[in-house]
Image (cartoon, helix red, strand yellow):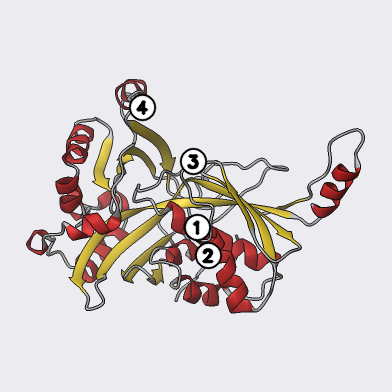
Amino acid sequence: MRGLLTLLFVTLGAGASAFTVGSRDGTARYSATRILRQSTGSSATNTDVSTASSETDSTLSLFSPCKINLFLRIIRKREDGFHDLASLFQAIGFGDSLELTPIDGTADEFTCNMPGVPVDSSNLVLRALELMRTKTGVEQYFKANLIKQVPAQAGLGGGSANAATAMWGANQLMGDPASLEEMVEWSGDLGSDITFFLSRGTAYCTGRGEIMDSIDPPLPSGTRLCIVKPNVGLSTPAVFKALEYDKLSTLDADEELLPTFLKGIDDVPDGYFINDLEFPAFKCLPELKELKDELLQEEGFDHVMMSGSGTSIFCLGEPSDKKAFEEKFAKREELQVFFSEFISRPEGKW
């Protein structure tokens, strides 16, 4: 495994999370810092003093980036019901923010700003915190506040990124009992995509997605893109159920796709931007294909493709007339539009 680092986090001040993205020189402008919570009132009641005292442990505010799939090949269905895939993952500077505070007690506390996100033990953040306790033997519990921007069922890996962020943050607040290599190994217990978010920012993922070959150096930061996400979502199992194996690409991921992308994304032919899940997703949701076709007509984009199992469509490049583009797409009630760019992590730094 080469250069396994994480791509997380930024804090600008107490409680203020920033969503700025990577700099043009290929590094990112993120750093993880600890925040000391303090009472801001001029006087405090007994309750205020108790609360302030319980918050004297530092709070770690972490950026949790999402991803796109630059290509996604489905190789075969396995005996266990899962599918082997081969995909080039790329981190982007659009994501969520996670605040972690160590607390005394025997249970984690979890809150989230986005309606509909589960706040019970099924949430990947809480599962990641429990996994870290189980694997390290450190009985530390946390108050976790997840500030979400990434929509669900988008194909952007938002939930997986949140889990990876929680693992790294918990490890730091526990005193770094686990190595990054150990966390990479453990992350597969939680889900297929989580391993990627412990890479430098670009990774070639195989198996169910949990076998990661970190690309070192990663693709350069700064490549612009636009994500258009319909409010309607698709479940990953539903998309896989609609697969037609005779419709899959025949391009070899190891021998043709990956080497071409690593030579430079600007020179990749449009036909190499392959997502084998597009056809079944479009079969499940025909209006998604209509959206892609509409975006293909916009000037300024080099490539347009669905990410993951959908329903986000990403467009590499920038619209020639951004104001007209926003009028056409961003103001539609059924769509969400996000502008971002590639990000990466310098080796040896967080």
Secondary structure found at label 3: loop
The residue tagged 3 is 115
Q: CA distance from mark 1 to mark 3?
A: 13 Å
Q: Residue 91: horizontal and vertical position, in percent? A: 43, 54
Q: Amino acid at mark 2?
A: Arg
In the picture, which quadrant includes the N terminus? Answer: bottom left
Q: Residues within 10 Å of mark 4 (few under 14, many from 20)?
A: some
Q: CA distance from mark 3 to mark 2?
A: 19 Å
Q: Amino acid at mark 1?
A: Asn
Q: Residue 238: horizontal and vertical position, in percent? A: 23, 55
Whichever of callouts 3 and 2 sits on the residue coming sooner in the sequence is 3
User: Does 263 sit left or right of 41 as displayed?
Assistant: left
The residue tagged 2 is 127
Secondary structure found at label 1: loop
The residue tagged 1 is 123
The residue tagged 4 is 330
Q: Are marks 1 and 2 in contact (CB under 8 Å)?
A: yes
